[in-house]
Amino acid sequence: MAASSTMCRKWTSSLIAQFLVLSPDQLTPALNTFPSFKEYTSSPGRFRGFCSDCGTSIAWRSADYTPIFDLYLGTLDEEWLVDGEMGKTLAIPNGTQYWLQNAIKGVTDKLKGGREYRTEGPDELRDLDSISKTT
């Protein structure tokens, strides 16, 4: 998954925030069992997790949809990312892309694959096709 929102860019210090969408039970031990894992409310009902020791951006979650959370790919240990098929599989965005209304033309709008969403609205996520048909 990838996100192009301004907040995600600033939070991750990168043009595209890449993350894994996980169920809380897929990560053991749970993030909240680590004393250095902290969260802050980045917008109503939205939480960003970070390491209070080093400041690393770790995760994002929504109070509206608790079965999943986003774990930033850059937080994975090198053994999973470097010199192997797993790293390639994880690092190539082939799932959903969010906040494409903020894409940088000719740079971050070149990723292809999966569903594309222009924005996140109060009525769930809206895909680019439905936005362009109504505007």
Image: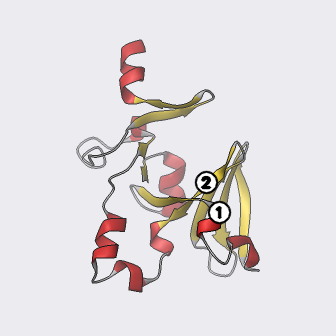
Q: Which numbered disc, 1 or 2, marks the residue that appears first in the sequence?
A: 1
The residue sitting at the front extreme is: 25
Instruction: Provide residue 70's location: percent of width, then percent of height.
Output: 56, 58
Q: In this view, does 67 lie above or below 74?
A: above
Q: How crowded is mark 1: few (under 14 residues within 10 Å), some or many (20 or more)?
A: some
| Residue linked to disc 2 | 68
Residue type highlighted by circle 2: Ile
Question: Which of the 4 quarters of the picture holds residue 48?
Answer: bottom right
Residue 90 vs residue 104, the one in the foreground: 90
* Element carrying mark 1: helix
- Spatial separation of the CA atoms under disc 1 and disc 2: 6 Å
| Residue linked to disc 1 | 24
Q: Residue at x 38, y 29 (%)?
A: 128
Residue type highlighted by circle 1: Pro
Q: In this view, does 117 lie above or below 104?
A: above
Is residue 42 found left or right of 113 in the rendered image? right
Instruction: Provide residue 45's location: percent of width, then percent of height.
Output: 73, 44
Instruction: Provide residue 38's location: percent of width, then percent of height.
Output: 73, 69
Q: Residue at x 69, y 73 (%)?
A: 30
Residue 128 vs residue 86, the one in the foreground: 86
Question: Which of the 4 quarters of the picture holds residue 90?
Answer: bottom left
**Callouts 1 and 2 close, C-beta under 8 Å:** yes
Instruction: Provide residue 54's location: percent of width, then percent of height.
Output: 62, 80
Q: Residues within 10 Å of mark 2 (few under 14, many from 20)?
A: some
* Element carrying mark 2: strand
Quadrant assignment for the C terminus: top left
Q: Residue 87 carries which label?
A: none
Q: Can residue 53 be seen in this view?
A: yes
Q: Can residue 135 be seen in this view?
A: no
The residue sitting at the top extreme is: 134
Is residue 101 found left or right of 83 in the rendered image? right
